[in-house]
Every structure is written in C-alpha cells, then in structure tokens.
Image: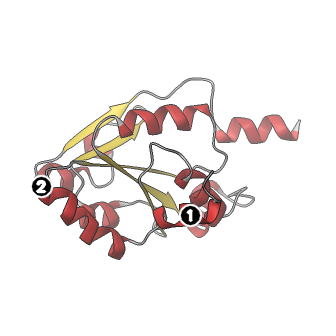
Amino acid sequence: MKAAASLRHKIITVEELLPHRARLRFFGKTVAFTNGCFDILHAGHIASLSAAAAEADYLVVGLNSDASVRRLKGDGRPVNDEQSRALLLASLMMVDAVVLFSEDTPRGLIARLLPDVLVKGGDYRVEDIAGSAEVLTAGGRIVINPILEGFSTTGIIEKARR
C-alpha cells in the first residue's frame, strides 16, 4: 500500500504542470480539466470526476484555495483545509494532478493550461463557463455533465448541524 505522502507528487503548481502538459501533447495524449471546492468529498463528486476522467487521457483538477472557498461560500467554509482537500483528490485513481488556485474562477489557470477538454458539472451554458472561450479558441471542447441529484456539500453540512 502506498503511503499518503507518496500522493503529494500529484499536487502540483501550474508551473510544474505546463512542461508535463507539453510532454503529454507531444505523445498525442489528451488533457481534461475540471474544478471545484471539493470541501466534503461525496458520491456526487466521485461521479463528476469519473465522468471528467473519461473525457481524456489525463485529468487535472483545479482546486479552490481556502481563501477562494471562503469568498465563494462564506464564513465557516471550507470545512476541510486546502491541503486536506488536495490530498483526498490526489488519492483518487481517476485524478492525475491537482492544482490549487486562489482566484474566484479558474479562468487564468485554464488559459495557461489550455486543456483539450474543459468539463463542468451542472446546468451551465458553455458561454458562462470560466475558461470556455480560451479552450474553444485553442481547438478544445467543452463538456457539461449532469449533477448526480441528492448530493451536495451544503446539504451534508446542514444535515450534520441538525
């Protein structure tokens, strides 16, 4: 069994990811990107990540930093700190790399990475997805996967408080 410390090689910066992205492209491999807070990992997240991983050879997950989650979700969030959330994501077999970002959206990260496939879960319109214009301009595609109903971090938190 691999030690949790060995998973840390999957938690990288965008600067570390870019040369690897170039190698993948050279060998004809495709890269998918998805993102989120992943505050309390649940079955909906697993379904979403599995669907994203099926879209390409290599899956990069953009993870909102603690400060970003706090701005987006409010005080009391995140429940789990960014290093814990990153380690949990890195432990999943379908995730190849985890990259933290501090902004409210991953647009800058996506513009630098230019994945072949940008995957988002929910009922978004393509034009409303951060980074979609950059990916489409570079010849990539956008995939919107349905959310697995009945699972949400907010719902889990509310249930725990009752």
Residue 49 at x, y percent in the picture:
46, 39
Seen from this angle, which residue lies furthest front?
Answer: 1
Residue displayed at 50% across by 31% down? 47
Residue 58: give x, y in percent of width and height: 32, 49
According to the image, label 2 marks what residue?
138
Q: Residue furthest top?
A: 149
Query: For the residue labelled by badge 2, is the local secondary structure a helix, a strand or a loop?
Result: loop
Q: Is residue 114 above or below residue 28?
A: below
Image quarter where the C terminus lies is top right
Determine whether the residue tagged by mark 1 lies in a helix, strand or loop.
helix
Q: Amino acid at mark 2?
A: Ala
Q: Disc number at residue 64?
A: none
Q: Earlier along the polypeptide chain: callout 2 or callout 1? A: 1
Q: Does residue 120 sit above or below 77 in this rendering?
A: above
Q: How many marks?
A: 2
Report crowding for label 2: few under 14, some 14 to 19, many 20 or more residues within 10 A (C-alpha): few
Residue drawn at x 45%, y 48% as measured from the top left: 95
Q: Which residue is painted at 60% across and 32% down in the image?
A: 43
- Residue 39 shown left or right of residue 119 in the figure: right
Q: Position of residue 12 (x, y in %)?
A: 44, 69
Pick the residue in front: 151 or 7. 7
